[in-house]
Amino acid sequence: MKFTHLSAALLGAVCSFQLAAPAAVKLPAVFGDNMVLQQQQAVPVWGWADPKGRVTVKFAGQTCSTRADASGKWLVKLGKLPASCTPQALVVESGESITLTNILVGEVWLASGQSNMEKPIGMQRGQQPTLNYEQELAAANYPQVRIFLVEKELSAKPLDQLLKFQGWQECSSNSLNTMHFSAAAYFFGRELHTNLNVPIGLIESSWGGTRVEPWTPPVGFQSVPSLAKVTTPAFGTNKIPNTAPTVLYNAMIAPIAGFGMRGAIWYQGESNRSDTNYDAKMAALVGGWRQVWHEGPFPFYFVQIAPFKYIKDLTTYSAETDPLPPFWLSQSRAARLIANSGMIVTTDLVDDLSDIHPRNKKEVGHRLALLALDKTYEQPVPSTGPAFKQMVVIGNKAFLSFKHLHGGLVSQDGQPLTWFTIAGADGKFVPAEAKIVGDNVVVSAAGVECPKAVRFAWNQIAQPNLVNAAGLPAEPFSTDHPVN
């Protein structure tokens, strides 16, 4: 970033966007050297200047001018930009001049959630590094992938400016490691870059252990009738907890809302695991973000949380009272309820059921990228695992059909299908035998003469082996609680 027409004394005082600058014009922190601007859609650029002052923005041959309002706020929109790997400069003038350099044009994505999104490739206190982390870091030099990190902060009211952040950097083993940037987001972005052959910008805003409500803007809650009365508490002089509604949105999302981007990826849910209405809360989150971004129903892809031994003493464990399988159903409902969204399944990606942070974040990023490549970029790639469609009972057997076969149903390890249970008229579920017959799974069990319901992966530690021919795992389901 380069400021012109400043004295040497003043230049030393201008060290970051969150500090008061003597220039007449300022930009939000998310605008900086090395950033990526979104291709093929209008690109908002905004900031502050002297009240009623004239502001001119120049980039890639375009010149846009406006006047700041009475409070000094201003906004212009650049016209649609073609993707470009050539570094360019963005100039903002209003009395003084700001020049941002090394800017590319490509695809921009926001990555958010709790600790499984926050988890970096390398070492993190209290966690194991991701699989093959040393090799992955050593190979992570992608100068056309740029990363920006929003750091943890809370606010009772929406902020105009980020309080803490690490500015845009070219992706390298060093920047990923020193920024502790999200592994899932990096692997997602890397795959988009190698497939689309355009620059990728990744903005991470995540916080381990957080619920969905603090990330949700007020307009999101207001758009869902069952949540319309949720508001930000009045904290007074009390410390703001990171569990309160809107407080993370206010500090970590609101200051970047409107920055041109293609869509968002989300990995969160462990802290909301006992919620039976998580699908409604997800609708509030996504609907709220879409409203404040003013880009319409942008793509939103998320991760179904993984199996984990939440209940440690399995001698007293009961699948009937386990909140995780119903929560999985709630996440599946969210994927159906929210337009232009998608969900990946991770039941097969856990190497240690006592570790709530599965290490295979490369596959998480890969599966999120498949959703984007398929649904957003319209590439012919399978992106979804088998999803239960219908049950037909013939005699003592339940015939289950599925969507998203992508070449058929298979056992991932070549062994008999696992984690199926079946119930008869008494409603008691017992372990079942399941076989693939054509495009169906046929389920039965001794003693169950007239099946009434079938469940799949209905257990906190379920790691089933049913996949489609593309190797994508089937969603957990219960035929007596369909989500289609």
Image: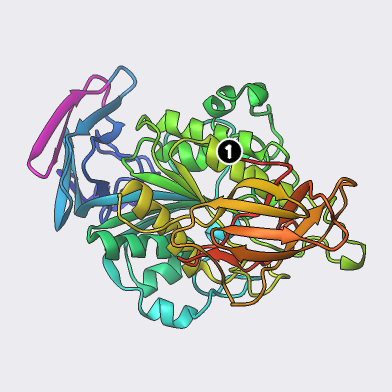
SS label for mark 1: helix
- On screen, residue 475 versus residue 374, left or right, reads right
- On screen, residue 262 versus residue 250, left or right, reads left
Q: Residue at x 67, y 69 (%)?
A: 417
Amino acid type, mark 1: Met
Query: Which of the image's four quarters has the C terminus?
Result: top right
- x, y percentage for residue 298? 39, 38
Q: Is residue 97 among the parts visible in the rendering?
A: yes
Give the residues in magenta: 50-68
Name the residue that disc number 1 marks: 282
Q: How many marks?
A: 1
Q: Residue at x 76, y 65 (%)?
A: 309
- On screen, residue 408 versus residue 475, left or right, reads left
- x, y percentage for residue 319? 82, 56
Q: Residue at x 44, y 28 (%)?
A: 291
Q: Nearer the viewer, residue 383 or 119?
A: 383
Q: Residue at x 39, y 44 (%)?
A: 263
